[in-house]
Image (cartoon, rainbow, N blue to C red):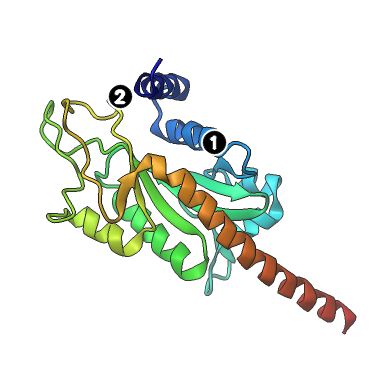
Amino acid sequence: MNSVDEAIRRRQSRVALSGGRWEDYVKIYLNEELEGTGIEVISGRSESEIRSRSPVLWKRLCLPLKVSAIEDHVWGDIDLVAVKGDIPIAIISCKVSLHGRFTETLFWSLLYRILTRIKVVLATPDAGRGREGQWVSEWGTPENPTKDRLLAESYLDGVYVENVEEWCKGIRPGQGTIFGGIVRPLSELPEDIKKWAEEAEKFYSYHGAKEDEGKRLSDFF
């Protein structure tokens, strides 16, 4: 079996394992590629599950509220999150189509980018926006970008695409998302996560030590 056939076989296997759910497909793929690195991609939808898993991770993923007298934090719209131990590396928003939901991703991304050092990316098959049976990319091209591509360039850390026929109805041989700039193949996301993990470990290693020092001083006094 050559490499192309093997890639097709593995893709078909992931589609079957995911049960037709794009989010699960992305999770399966990333965990396959990140095996042995200490990095894991987990679901972030349940705040209580994250808190049970690791109070430190939970705290680092919470977004603070400054004026509410009822709550001091809010839980963001987290589909998947890449973590290494207690360190959040990247939030991965999984959207089959951008119709009506891309603004949510941009909103939460903006908050996380302002208040944390966590990367926020979008993973999508690019379901298209043409008429039924006619696939047209939602992203345009680097030279002729759609509004969504322009917004992603300003407010996301990356858009990662894999045109899987299961979710790209009407796509024809030879058609596909045009990569360039912010829009890149999903196959590049694992390496980016590894790079971001190294950066995050350095950051939390330094700031975690500073926090521990501050706590020891406060306990002393």
Q: Is residue 7 above or below residue 33?
A: above
| Image point (83%, 81%), residue name | 217
Mark 2 to mark 1 CA distance (whole Å): 20 Å
* Residue highlighted by disc 1: 31
Q: Are marks 2 and 1 in contact (CB under 8 Å)?
A: no
* Residue highlighted by disc 2: 166
Q: On the rendered image, what quadrant is the N terminus found in?
A: top left
The residue closer to the viewer here, 67 or 179, is 179
Question: How dense is the environment of label 1, judged by Cα within 10 Å: few (below 14), some, or many (20 and up)?
Answer: some
Q: Is residue 1 above or below residue 68?
A: above
Q: Is residue 72 visible to the viewer in this orientation of the structure?
A: yes
The residue closer to the viewer here, 196 or 73, is 196
> Relative to residue 157, is residue 82 drawn left or right?
right
| Image point (27%, 40%), residue name | 97
The single residue placed furthest to the bottom in the displayed view is 221
- The kind of residue tagged 2 is Glu
Q: On the rendered image, what quadrant is the C terminus found in?
A: bottom right
- The kind of residue tagged 1 is Asn
